[in-house]
Image (tube, helix red, strand yellow):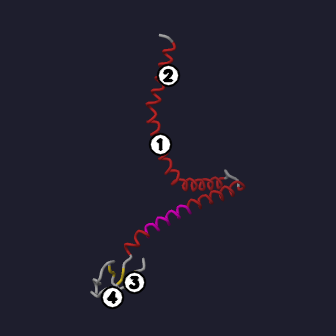
Amino acid sequence: MEISSIIIGLILLGGSVAYISLPFRQRQMKDTNSSKAPIQRSGQREVVLNALRDLDFDFKTGKVNEEDYKPLRAQLMVEAAQYMEAEKRGDDQLEEMIRARRTPKQEGLRCQYCKALIRAGDLFCSSCGKRIEIQIEAVAPS
């Protein structure tokens, strides 16, 4: 056997192994990236709060002097406040979406005589039996 045929065989072997393992490596990289993204988003606030706690502990034990402590603590407090504000905005948006979804179901019409709730499209009140006039007032959302 010639040396050139051995080298060509090894090159073909390496190429085929790389080609066969490519889908497995791509899936592993995709799984790694997708699992890190939620951790990074949800865990950033905790990381900042832990860093703040550690900084306070280091200052109390004397590992960090006051010159370094004050600016670092101020910076970490600002970051923590930003994460908490973003979380609050997200909660407010979620509450608004829930409120918007519930309002049409809770909103109804009231009879002008007995103030009982009536469904849209009814011609008569189910409570008092009187004909529903055009002047039906809407119920204020709770």
Assign a secondary structure to mark 3: strand
Q: Earlier in the sequence, mark 4 or mark 1?
A: 1
Query: Which residue is labeled 2 in the image?
Result: 11
- Residue drawn where x is 42% and y is 77% of the image: 141
Q: How far apart are labels 2 and 4 at the CA level?
A: 90 Å
Callout 2 secondary element: helix
Image point (33%, 84%), residue name: 116
Q: Nearer the viewer, mark 4 or mark 3?
A: 3
Nearer the observer: mark 2 or 1; the answer is 2
Q: Are marks 4 and 1 in contact (CB under 8 Å)?
A: no
The residue carrying mark 1 is 30
Q: Which residue is mark 3?
A: 137
Kind of residue at disc 3: Glu
Asked which secondary structure carries label 4, the reply is loop
Upstream in sequence: badge 2 or badge 3: 2
Please name the amino acid that badge 1 sits on.
Lys
Q: Earlier in the sequence, mark 2 or mark 4?
A: 2
The mark closer to the camera, 3 or 1, is 3
Front in this rendered view, residue 50 or 12: 12
Q: Quadrant where the C terminus lies? A: bottom left
Q: Amino acid at mark 4?
A: Cys
The region drawn magenta spans 85-99
User: Tag 1, which secondary structure?
Assistant: helix
**Extreme-right residue of the structure:** 67
